[in-house]
Each structure stands twice: as structure tokens, then as C-alpha cells.
Image: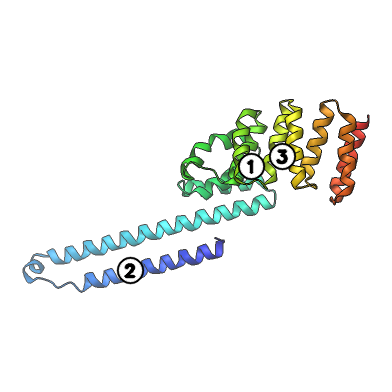
Amino acid sequence: MDLARFIFWEGLKTLGLLFLGLLAAKAVGALARPAPLARRGVAPLLRASLYLLILMLVGTGALTIGYDLAAEAYMYACVRDLGRREVGMAYLNARQAVKLRPATLRYWQTLASAKFAQQQFASVIADLPVLLALSGGKLEEEEAYRVAAAYYFLGQYEQVFPLTRRMIRENRVFAAPYVLEGYTYIAQKKYAPAEKVFLEVLQMFPSQQAAVEGLAHAHYLSGQRAAALSVLDQTAQFRFPSEARQRFEALKDLYAQ
């Protein structure tokens, strides 16, 4: 839901709340006054109490809607800041959204994105119980990948595989978990399974740059320099952006030494 639509619906809620408040106030004002009570001043006191109750309910509802609007605005500000690579401001805005609405999953997900951009990997993992509780025990694909990558950067490699394998099982054409799993094997110096994973990716996506580099690197680290250079040479058969071509040439120079 984009911000404009969210504001529209929250505005309708506000109008509805005000309308109900006016109706309730009108109903209270129309209450008949039993004469014995009126003489003792009980009826005016009752009506005043009811008016006060209505005012409190309307005020509480308006405050709730205000918090909803503010939290949503902070979340969209965080997304904007991440797009601009202003990760410090993104983190502050995401924290404000979570502070206002701590039981809303998407605000915690936005905070996780900001923390990851700031390389707060341990903090991303620390928030995992909250994310699981709010998501019903199962992370969404993007969130699962972020958590797996956080484990990778923290060097907790055995925690990576359950997440990547689940993602691969549920979406076999999502390249990112394959690549992350391959690089995790490389970090563990398990070059043969790394090569197998990268080849599996490249069979589906021959121009997946990270998989090409991963396969070449796995070959090189296992002592297969010629195989590493061959992988990079074979990229000439496929279309890659100029930046990727420059990267491949730099790796060729490195492996040829």
C-alpha cells in the first residue's frame, strides 16, 4: 500500500470517527430529562459525563490514527533514505516507526533493511525472534535472505544453510540463495560443493555475474587456475554489462599471475 492510499484510508477513518462522535453527542443531547432527577441535578451531570466519555473516545481514536500516519510516514522516509544511500537517516526513521507501532511487522522489516545497510548484522540477528513472532514463525523470502546474509557476514556459516536451502526449496529460480550458499562453502574452504552450487545457478542463469565470479574463485582457490580462467573466458558467449566485463578482466589478470 503506497503512502497516498494509506493517508486516504486513514482520512476516511478520521471522518468516520468524527461522524460517529457527532451522532453520539446528538443522541446524548436528545435524552429526555426525568423531572425528579433533573431537580436533583443528576441528569445534567449524567449528560456531562457522557459528553466527556465521547470526547475521550474520539480523542483516543484520533491519537491512534495520528500514530498510524506518523509510523507510516517514518517507514516511507526510511525507504526513501535507503534509495538515496542515506543509511543513517534511514535507520533513525525506521526506529521511530517501530517505536510508534512495535506490533507491526512491516516496520520491523524496514528497520532490518536499515540495519543491514549499516552492517549492523548482529542487531539484525538479535531482532529475529520479534520478526518470527510477528510473521507467524516463517520469514518472508527477502527477510530470510537478509538474515542468512547477516549470518554469513558474522561468520556463522552453519546458520546460513537451513535458510538458503529452504528458500531454494520454495523458489528454485531465485538465484540469490544459491549464490550465498556457494560463497558460504568457499568461506568454509569446501570448494567442490561450492562449484556444484554455482554450476547449478549458471545452468539456469548463464549471465549471473556473482555466480560466474564465485565459480571461477572456487576453481582458483582449489588450485585449478586453468579452470578458473576458462570460466571467465566463456563469459564472452553471453551478454554482460561493461562493469562486469571490467571485473572479469581484472580477475583474469589476478588468476594469471
Query: Which residue is labeled 2 in the image?
Result: 20
> Which dot marks residue 168?
1
Query: Which residue is labeled 3 in the image?
Result: 179
- Residue at 29% x, 71% y is 23
Q: Which of pointers 1 and 2 lies earlier in the amino acid sequence?
A: 2
Q: Is residue 215 visible?
A: yes
- Residue at 72% x, 36% y is 197
In-front residue for pair 210/103: 210
| Residue 122 location (% of width, % of height) | 60, 33
Dot 2: within a 10 Å radius of its alpha carbon, few (fewer than 14), some, or many (20 or more) residues? some
Mark nearest the camera among 1 and 2 is 1
Determine whether the residue tagged by mark 1 lies in a helix, strand or loop. helix
| Residue 192 location (% of width, % of height) | 76, 29
Q: Which of pointers 3 and 1 lies earlier in the amino acid sequence?
A: 1
Separation of marks 2 and 3 at Cα, in angstroms: 56 Å
Q: Which of pointers 2 and 3 lies earlier in the amino acid sequence?
A: 2
Q: Is residue 181 above or below residue 172?
A: above
Mark nearest the camera among 2 and 3 is 3
Mark nearest the camera among 3 and 1 is 1
Determine whether the residue tagged by mark 2 lies in a helix, strand or loop. helix
In-front residue for pair 91/163: 163
- Residue at 45% x, 58% y is 66
